[in-house]
Image (cartoon, helix red, strand yellow):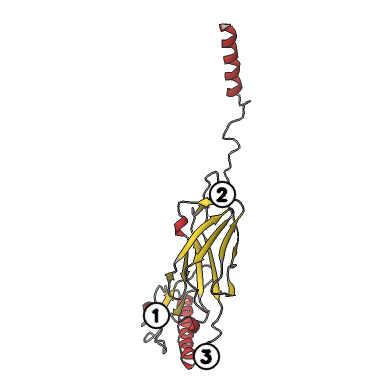
Amino acid sequence: MVKKGIALFCVLSLVFTHGIFLNVNAGRDKTAPVYKSASPRNNQENIERNTKISINFNENIYNGKNFTGIKIKNLFSQKCISISRSISKKQILIKHTYFLTYDTIYVLTIPANAVKDKAGNLLKKAKTISFRIKANPNEEPNDPKKAACQANLRTMDGTIQLAVSMGDTITSIADLVPMYLTRVPACPDGGTYTFVPAFVNQAAQVVCSIPSHNLY
C-alpha cells in the first residue's frame, strides 16, 4: 500500500513538472481596459450647459488608484470645476454641481490608472477630451467691448505664432513683452487675460476670463 502511494506521488510530480495540469495563472486576464468613446465627443461644440458626461470602455471597470484624479477644467479660467464621479459597469459617469458656463471650452482629463478591470489591470494611458458649451442666446449682438477684446486676442495670438516661428519659447504673457509687444493689452470689459499652453490639437493662446469674448 505504501509502495502504491509512493508511485502515485511520483506520477503526480511528473505530471505537474511537465505542465500537463493547467497552471492556474495561465488564463489570467492581462489586458487593460480600453477607452471606446465619450459623451460629449472630443471637440464637440454647441453642448447644453446641463449636459451629462460619460466615458465608455470595452469592459466592466472599477475604481483605480487615480480615480479621484479625473477632473474637468474650464479652459478660459484654468480652474477645475466641482464634480462627482461614479462607475456603472463599462462607464464612468460624471456629474457637475452647477450649470456649465456659456460659450466656454471645458477639458476633461482621465489620468492613467484611473480605472481597472476585474483582474486588476489598470488603464495604461491618460485620455483628454475637450468640448464647448453653446453660446448664450440672450447675449447682445455687436457688443463693441467684445469686439475690442477679440482684437486684442487676435493680436496676441498672432504674436505667439510669430514667436514660435522664430524659435522663441513662450510660457506666459510676460514672455511676449518686450520682445514682441510694448505692453499687455487689457480687456475693455474688465476681463482678465491668461496664457494657456498648447494641448492636444489646440495651439497655445491667450484667453479672456469672459467666455463670450474668446476666439476659439
Q: In this view, does 135 lie above or below 202?
A: below
Residue 162: percent from left, percent from top:
47, 80
Residue type marked 3: Glu
Residue 100: percent from left, percent from top:
50, 74
Residue 142: percent from left, percent from top:
53, 93
Q: Which residue lies furthest to the front in this view?
A: 97
Q: Quarter-wise, where is residue 180 in the image?
A: bottom left
Please give the residue where the numbered disc 1 appears in the rendered image: 176
Please give the residue where the numbered disc 2 appears in the rendered image: 32
User: Dot 1: what SS?
Assistant: helix
Whichever of labels 1 and 2 marks the residue nearer the N terminus, that label is: 2
Whichever of labels 1 and 3 marks the residue nearer the N terminus, that label is: 3
Q: Mark 2 to mark 3: distance in Å?
A: 50 Å
Q: In this view, does 172 lie above or below 68?
A: below
- Of the two numbered discs 1 and 2 in the rendering, the one whose residue sits closer to the viewer: 2
Residue type marked 1: Leu
Please give the residue where the numbered disc 3 appears in the rendered image: 140
Residue type marked 2: Ala
Q: Mark 1 to mark 2: distance in Å?
A: 44 Å
The one nearer the camera, 146 or 206, is 146
